Image (spheres, rainbow, N blue to C red):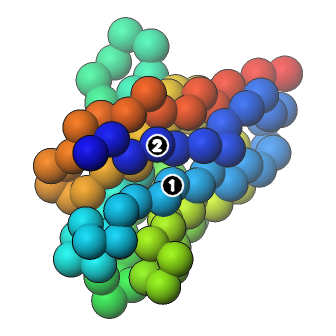
Amino acid sequence: VQLQASGGGLVQPGGSLTLFCEAPRRIFIVSEMAWYRQAPGKQREKVAHIRISGADNYADSVKGRFTISRDNAKATVTLQMNSLKLEDTAVYYCNTDPPFQTWGQGTLVTVSS
């Protein structure tokens, strides 16, 4: 199953974006979820993780700026990104954690002035 992320776009440094992802309910309700990103020329990395309980944790590079949340009733996970920096430019993906599902196309976030 591919999980499709949406909500990316072009934003200036310091701006905000919210990313969205919907998963099949049968997968979502039993899975920890995460947002990942892959910047040009770099390996994919996990930036935010959320347990079924809602407990979350973040990569140091985004801590204090990004917030992951999940709606177990709607089987959706979001990533609120604030104070975006140039180095946040990447394709963002959602997946389970560990990433058991097929990677979708992701959504491109470009931070540029």
Side (left or right) of 13 relative to 1: right
Q: Is residue 88 above or below residue 28?
A: above
Task: Say which mark, if any, is on residue 77.
Answer: none
- Cα gap from disc 1 to disc 2, whole angstroms: 6 Å
Give the residue at x 48% y 59%.
Answer: 22
Give the residue at x 55% y 62%.
Answer: 78
Give the residue at x 51% y 44%.
Answer: 5
SS at mark 2 in the image: strand
In depth, the one of 11 and 6 nearer the eye is 6
* Quadrant the C terminus occupies: top right
Q: Position of residue 91 (x, y in %)?
A: 50, 28
Residue 99 visible (yes or no): yes
Identity, as a three-letter code, of the amino acid under mark 2: Gln
Q: Earlier in the sequence, mark 1 or mark 2?
A: 2
Q: Is residue 59 above or below residue 75?
A: above
Q: Which residue is mark 2?
A: 4
Category of crowding for the residue at label 1, using alpha-carbon neighbours closer than 10 angstroms: few (below 14), some (14–19), many (at least 20): many
SS at mark 1 in the image: strand
Side (left or right) of 70 relative to 2: right
Question: In which image quadrant can residue 42 be found?
Answer: top left
Pick out the residue farthest to the top.
41
State if disc 2 and disc 1 touch (CB < 8 Å). Answer: yes
Task: Say which mark, if any, is on residue 21.
Answer: 1
Q: Position of residue 18 (x, y in %)?
A: 68, 54
Residue 63 visible (yes or no): no
* Quadrant the N terminus occupies: top left
Q: Position of residue 19 (x, y in %)?
A: 61, 51
